[in-house]
Image (cartoon, rainbow, N blue to C red):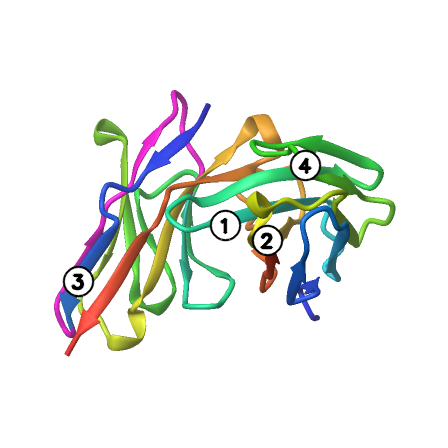
Amino acid sequence: AQSVTQPDIHITVSEGASLELRCNYSYGATPYLFWYVQSPGQGLQLLLKYFSGDTLVQGIKGFEAEFKRSQSSFNLRKPSVHWSDAAEYFCAVASIDSGYALNFGKGTSLLVTP
Amino acid sequence: NAGVTQTPKFRVLKTGQSMTLLCAQDMNHEYMYWYRQDPGMGLRLIHYSVGEGTTAKGEVPDGYNVSRLKKQNFLLGLESAAPSQTSVYFCASRKSSRAQETQYFGPGTRLLVL
């Protein structure tokens, strides 16, 4: 079954610093990959998605992610973090076996310091 | 469009009580999903539906039942609530079977079972 792993449970960055959140997937064929963000007490908002084509995907709020098949990774990046980016970030892969439901990683909690 | 809405937003139950969570979408989406979110676990799929009148089990279906009598509504039932079902429940929908379709999430229902 398709699955994702987010190795970092918590990450702390200074405001204005660059950010990279790691995501590794397990799937034989080309996966359909997503990054969602969840602010405290809120629902999930899609940041970006990859299903084919250009391996560098641009998303909302200045985020981008790069699909690397050789490393089975789909890492999320942002050049300069803002305090409002503090949130929980989830990587997910669509599961063809269950109506394209999403298999989520356990999430990475981002703290932004002044 | 309201998107995906969930009712209620918050509920407290006693062990053994029953309740139904309602998910409604006004986007004419075919696919609908119920997930639960627990600390450190990410989101896990409970049940899903690929169309009106059809439902299927996800990763953690025990203790839950679902119904999709109308295309726009997806109901999640707890027949006899248990403390282990204390969680935040998210409903989501997507338009069709195309893999790249985005899933849209509701705001969540917080359930506390005492």
Residue A67 can be seen in this image? no
Q: Distance between the Cα atoms at labels 1 and 3?
A: 23 Å
- Earlier in the chain: of badge 1 and badge 4, it is 1
* Residue A104 falls within the magenta-colored stretch: no
For the view shown, which residue lies furthest in the bottom direction?
A114
Residue A63 in percent (x, y) is at 30, 61
Would you name the residue on which mark 4 appears?
B63
Q: Distance between the residues labelled 3 and 2?
A: 28 Å
Residue A54 is left or right of residue B46, and the answer is left
Query: Which residues make up the magenta segment?
Result: A15-33
Q: Is mark 1 on a helix, strand or loop?
A: strand
In this rendering, position of residue B67 left or right of residue B7: right
Q: Position of residue A98 (x, y in %)?
A: 60, 30
Same-chain check, marks 2 and 4 = yes
Q: On what subunit does the disc labeled 3 rest?
A: A
Q: In which quarter of the image is the N terminus of chain B?
A: bottom right
Q: Name the residue under label 3.
A: A12
Please report, as a chain letter, where disc 2 is located.
B
To which residue does mark 1 refer? Answer: B37
Q: Mark 2 or mark 1: name the one nearer the start of the chain.
A: 1
Dots 2, 1 in contact, CB < 8 A: yes
Q: Decide which of tag 2 and tag 4 comes sooner along the chain.
A: 4
Q: Nearer the viewer, residue B11 or B36?
A: B11
